[in-house]
Amino acid sequence: MTIEPDFSEAAPAAEDKRPAERPLRPALWRGWRRRCPNCGSGPMMRSYLKVRDDCPVCGEAFHHHRADDGPAYLTILIVGHVMAPLLLWAFTTFRPDPMVLGTIFSVGCVALSLYLLPRLKGAIVGLQWAKRMHGFNQT
Ligand SMILES: [Zn+2]
């Protein structure tokens, strides 16, 4: 004979302690624009990739973020999936000189990566803020 544990009383108490949800889509969009995911007007970055410790407008703390390698991973993923088929199409359609093709696609890959990297970092910080990951669950 087995006795099943009864979790019916423990579940509501755990749910009550959860903080209110933060909207994900506005947080991602504000992060993509490199703005504070909380107020949408304060700048998130203090240089090209450095995230501020807190928002200068609303004071929301950003130092909890753990973007780590995520933005670089997503940048490589997107740039590779956009540029590789484009490279194949350009090569088979135009048959350009290899130096011309290499130069154009090298500059294109670097430019697209530099465009995407800070925006994806902002979006990841926005995601972490919205999902209350790491230290973002304290307020
Ligand atoms: Zn703010």
Image (cartoon, rainbow, N blue to C red):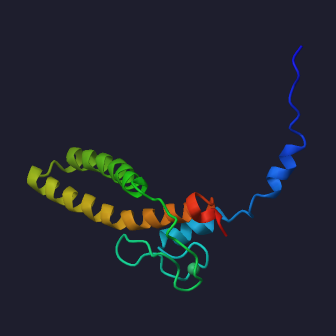
Name the quadrant of the C terminus: bottom right
State the image coordinates of residue 55 (x, y, percent, origin top left): 53, 80
Q: Judge by depth and name the residue closer to the eye, 95 or 128.
A: 128
In this rendering, the answer to whether 98 lies above or below 17 is above
Q: How many marks?
A: 0
State the image coordinates of residue 72 (x, y, percent, origin top left): 36, 55
State the image coordinates of residue 73 (x, y, percent, origin top left): 38, 51
Q: Is residue 86 left or right of residue 53?
A: left
State the image coordinates of residue 97 (x, y, percent, origin top left): 9, 52
Q: Is residue 34 left or right of residue 37?
A: left
Q: Is residue 20 left or right of residue 10?
A: left
Q: Quadrant of residue 22?
A: bottom right
Q: Residue at x 16, y 48 (%)?
A: 95
Q: Residue furthest bottom?
A: 57
Q: Residue at x 49, y 68 (%)?
A: 32
Q: Judge by depth and name the residue closer to the eye, 82 or 49.
A: 49
Query: Which quadrant contains ligand 1?
Result: bottom right
Name the quadrant of the N terminus: top right
Q: Residue at x 75, y 58 (%)?
A: 18
In this rendering, the answer to whether 22 lies above or below 59 is above
